[in-house]
Image (spheres, grey):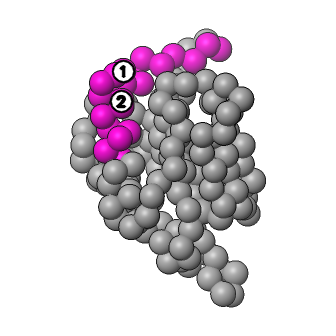
Amino acid sequence: MKIVIQRVAEATVEVEGRQVARIGRGLLVLVGVDVDDTPADAVYLAAKTAALRVMNDDDGVMNRSVVDVDGELLAVSQFTLLASTRRGNRPSYIRAAKRPLSTDLFDLYVAELERVAGRRVQQGVFGADMKVGLVNDGPVTIVIDSKENGK
């Protein structure tokens, strides 16, 4: 699995002109599921997301987790994170998992993140054409691939 974590002042998701999710200060997480991913990948990344020290402490240093600062969480599925651009100019999505694996592992990531963070995780709508709005705070953007980070 690959995730992109963005520290945000706020973030929203709209589907067909209707707002389906909104958070204030916290983390927006874009989640891509690879064809070779397993439940262990989802569990590892959920724990990493909750514990990642990317929120500022009282001195303005990134030394606190989203849990430490009582921040909010928003997870959005995004198969394009698995794009390969090695050949030509049209991305290939052959590594992106299809349903039911992609939905099962995305749902497990969200459920595990809720468990370890001790709070509800807002979500986009899986497979929908979403409009994601955000105010990136910092900016802070972190990419984590469960295959490259030793799960």
Relative to 102, residue 47 above or below: below
Say which quadrant the N terminus sits in: top left
Q: Amino acid at mark 2?
A: Ser
Q: Is residue 108 magenta?
A: yes
Q: Position of residue 11 (x, y in %)?
A: 67, 50
Q: Position of residue 78 (x, y in %)?
A: 52, 33
Q: Position of residue 18 (x, y in %)?
A: 67, 33
Q: Is residue 93 magenta?
A: yes
Q: Can the viewer see residue 142 in this picture?
A: no
Q: Nearer the viewer, residue 137 or 90?
A: 137
- Most extreme residue toward the front is 18
- Could you say which quadrant of the image residue 2 lies in? top left
Disc 2, SS: helix
Q: Amino acid at mark 1?
A: Lys
Relative to 25, residue 150 above or below: above
Q: Which residues are magenta?
A: 89-109
Q: Nearer the viewer, residue 104 or 138?
A: 104
The answer to whether residue 148 is left or right of residue 88 is: left
Relative to 113, residue 94 above or below: above
Which residue is at a point 47% across and 30% down the rendered structure image?
Answer: 126
Q: Could you classify mark 2 by the number of other residues whose Cα lies within 10 Å: few (under 14), some (14-19), or many (20 or more)?
A: many
Q: Can the viewer see residue 73 in this picture?
A: yes
Q: Could you classify mark 1 by the number of other residues whose Cα lies within 10 Å: few (under 14), some (14-19), or many (20 or more)?
A: few
Asked if marks 1 and 2 touch (Cβ < 8 Å), the reply is yes
Which residue is at a point 33% across and 61% down the rendered structure image?
Answer: 115
Q: Position of residue 52 (x, y in %)?
A: 47, 66
Q: On the image, numbered disc 2 is attached to which residue?
A: 102
Q: On the image, numbered disc 1 is attached to which residue?
A: 98
Residue 125: give its label.
Answer: none
Disc 1, SS: loop
Which residue is at a point 51% across and 33% down the rendered structure image?
Answer: 125
Relative to 68, residue 94 above or below: above
